[in-house]
Image: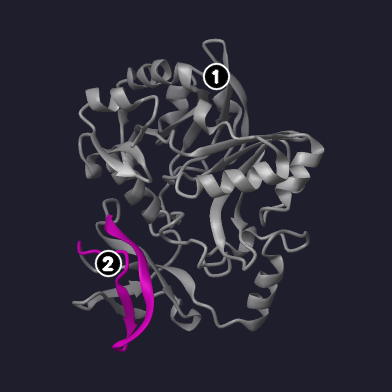
Amino acid sequence: MRRTPLHDEHVALGGKVVDFHGWALPVQFAGIIEEHHHTRTKAALFDCSHMGEFVIRGEQAVRAFGNLVCLDPLKVPVGRGKYGAMLNGAGGIIDDVIAFRLDEFDFYVVTNAGPLEIVSARIRDAAGDTDVSDDTAKIDIQGPLARDILANEIPECTSLKYYQARYATWNGVEIVLSRTGYTGELGYELFVPNRIAVDLWRKLLSYPDVKPAGLGARDTLRTEMCYGLSGQDFDESRTPLEAGMANFIAWDKDFVGRDALLAKREAGGYPVLTPIKTGDRRAPRHGFDAKHNGNIVGVVTSGTFGPSVCHGIGFAYVPQPLATPETKLTAGPRDLDIETTTVPIYTRGTCRT
């Protein structure tokens, strides 16, 4: 397994390390539920250094990148980020991405670990060698106290609103800072050179209200907010129309997969990714059949206990007529009672404050 620059820190803190897409990453430290609640109430630190980062500069390279994704980078205001996806020719989702526009033709693009090899090859063929993943550590500080804490180290963070990004410095070293995250809480993602990752991690953990958190809490937090997971809730077998990304498609420009999406939109009849919940602590599981009146109508892609809502939650692909909230379904071999619900499942997140 590959190790992040913070691997030894996780071991020293007692983190339970697991294999995640070929990376040795902590699934938990003190415990998933404790880390979940700490993120919702104070501030947690996540090592996300397994993710991919690309620096795309110059008009030609930016336009070439734009042809690979369903978002339009040229319409993103400077200092902001935009969510979208990279698609194959059939409109299937290779990966979801965020593109931050730091200057007119200066973009910082963030992708996931699982499909990174494919994504990197596509960007390289179109826009040149822009992959800086191996040289970059990604540290996320998330929680309602994140801004107050981070301001002591990086005062520039206070100028950022939700989904904004900028260059900043820490101890004289240039970093990329964005006000984004995967938890639903006020937070920041810090993209830093590997050489300063340990020092920054230790410094942020020195604040009493900051605790480390692992993949387990990250999963429960994102599921409560209805944030999909690449490779689990969507992949190349699903399109943005099905995966709840229709609002992130720039239909007025050309991109790989556009014709296929137009045809699918015209034909209709495709299933959609829908949040689901149970009435108790039991949770549906990935791969469970979703049934309506005893008939299999879809499949569960994510399922977990939601610590903030105190019941089972998840996502399932179901036919559009059944995606209306409060539709009664069952899931799995024991016909667990579930029902469709609204987005987000947890509604008290602080990410936009």
As drawn, 189 above or below 235: above
312 drawn magenta: no
x, y percent for residue 60: 80, 41
Image mark for residue 155: 1
Residue 42 or residue 286, whichever sits in front: 286
Residue 126 or 157: which is nearer the viewer? 126
In the image, what residue type sits under mark 2? Pro
The residue lying furthest to the top in this view is 172
Could you tell me which residue is drawn at 35 percent across and 18 percent down? 202
Disc ID at residue 284: 2
Residue type, numbered disc 1: Pro
Q: Main secondary structure of the magenta part?
A: strand
Report whether 32 appears left or right of 121: left
Please provide percent x and percent y for residue 106. Answer: 72, 33
Q: Is residue 324 above or below residue 236?
A: below
Secondary structure at numbered mark 2: loop
- In front here: 33 or 291? 291
Residue nearest the viewer, comparing 150 with 304 = 304
Bounds of the magenta segment:
281-305
* Rendered-image quadrant of the N terminus: top left
Q: Position of residue 35 (x, y in %)?
A: 27, 39
